[in-house]
Image (cartoon, rainbow, N blue to C red):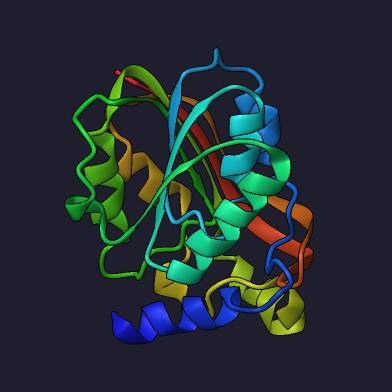
Amino acid sequence: MNEWINRWNERFAKTEYAYGKEPNEYLREQLTKLPVGKILFAAEGEGRNAVFAAQQGWQVSAFDISVEGKRKALQLAAERGVTLDYQVGELQSLGYAPNQFDAIALIYAHFPAAIKSKMHRELDRYLRKDGVVIFEAFSKRHIEYNSKNEKVGGPKDLASLFSVEELQSDFANYHTLVLEEKEIELNEGLYHIGTGSVIRFVGKKK
């Protein structure tokens, strides 16, 4: 885990924002369809998506394992005149309450392969009934795109990437509003540039 933390601290320690300051397009599109409430951003990094949600009037909580990510997120929030409740640490230790949130955002939240499904199931505890999950991350097919263009980013091991079937299993107790594998063009900061393959999921908790 220390190696994982060090990797992200190193990436986020730079002056530039690794994935830019603007929100992910899919997050922007989906969030604007929902009534404003309380939202949790998992593995939120430098805060671009959380800050956007706060600008829209959401009460925003976020977490990551990187202290450098938090520093940059709070810096961006101050620039944009909003506040975030941003914690650093592992989910179980952060003190969120069951059913606390109206929405949970998982935007390129590539947890280590061994725990990624477990994390999804744990996050479910904090979402209220009829709450919504918004998810976009790289699909297993993306490994082919990354091999042709490293600038598009994403994990290089198949097990850390996602499939439609995994999302169906991890979020079995949800009404599926969107679940698709799609080729998209990414232009996010320094590390998401080019054509990639993603899984998109929007689900409402039963």
Q: Residue at x 61, y 36 (%)?
A: 82
Residue 198 in the image: x percent, y percent?
A: 62, 54
Q: Residue at x 65, y 24 (%)?
A: 56
Residue 87's place in the image compared with 40, above or below, is below
The one nearer the camera, 60 or 28, is 60
The answer to whether residue 181 is visible is: no
Q: Using residue 54 as the reference point, say whether residue 61 is left or right of it.
A: left
The answer to whether residue 80 is visible is: yes
Tally of numbered tags: 0
Location of the N terminus by quadrant is bottom left
The one nearer the camera, 25 or 37, is 37
Q: Residue furthest bottom?
A: 3
Q: Residue at x 56, y 52 (%)?
A: 74
Q: Residue at x 47, y 47 (%)?
A: 164
Quadrant of the rendered structure where residue 21 is? bottom right
Residue 153 in the image: x percent, y percent?
A: 66, 73
Quadrant of the rendered structure where residue 77 is? top right
Q: Using residue 160 as the reference point, say whether residue 47 is left or right of it.
A: right
The one nearer the camera, 150 or 18, is 18
Residue 117's place in the image compared with 12, above or below, is above
Q: Using residue 172 as the reference point, say whether residue 20 is left or right of it.
A: right
Residue 206 in the image: x percent, y percent?
A: 29, 18
